[in-house]
Amino acid sequence: MSTLVKICGVTTPGDAALAAAAGADLVGFVLHPGARRGVTVGQAADIVTAVRDAGAEPVAVFVDQGPVEIETLAESLGLGVVQLHGPPAKAARYELPAGLARI
């Protein structure tokens, strides 16, 4: 069993690429309006591209979103992994597609 490294809270494609280049397996960004390190969906799309180009797996962090919004955003960004943080997002875990990994 190997250890996976996740860096979270990146806000720019450049920082995301640096995290991946430094060895992170997973690179996360926060999709929560008002969060100190939150990003827009447009910014997230650029981060996803940078993370994938650098050979890591992008992860979106959801806080107050419900299952429909989480699934819609994950699909639109092409994500295979989401992090559920906060009661509404955690409650959504049983309603998300089986193929969408949760951490």
Image (cartoon, rainbow, N blue to C red):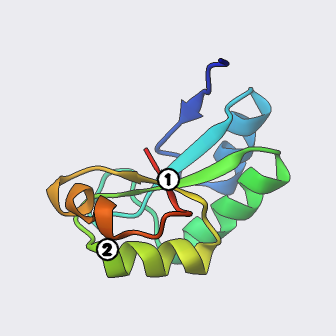
In the picture of the structure, the residue carrying the numbered disc 2 is 67
Residue 93, percent from left and from top: 32, 59
Residue 94 shows which numbered tag?
Answer: none
- Is 73 drawn above or below residue 53 in the view shown? below
Q: Secondary structure at mark 2?
A: helix
- Is 22 drawn above or below residue 25 in the view shown? above
In the picture of the structure, the residue carrying the numbered disc 1 is 29
Task: Please state which of residues 28 and 100 is positioned toward the viewer in this rendering.
Answer: 100
- Residue 78, image quadrant: bottom right
- Residue 55, image quadrant: top right
Residue 70, percent from left and from top: 39, 72
Q: Is residue 79 left or right of residue 54?
A: left
The amino acid sitting under disc 2 is Pro
- Is 75 drawn above or below residue 11 in the view shown? below
Mark in front: 1 vs 2:
2
Residue 24, percent from left and from top: 67, 31
Residue 77, percent from left and from top: 60, 73
Task: Give the crowd class for mark 2: few <14, some 14-19, many >=20 residues within 10 Å.
Answer: some
- Which residue occupies 57% across, 77% down? 75
The amino acid sitting under disc 1 is Phe
Task: Give the crowd class for mark 1: few <14, some 14-19, many >=20 residues within 10 Å.
Answer: many
Which residue reaches farthest left?
A: 87
Task: Please state which of residues 30 and 1 is positioned toward the viewer in this rendering.
Answer: 1
- Which residue occupies 68% across, 55% down? 13
Q: Secondary structure at mark 1?
A: strand
**First along the sequence among labels 1 and 2:** 1
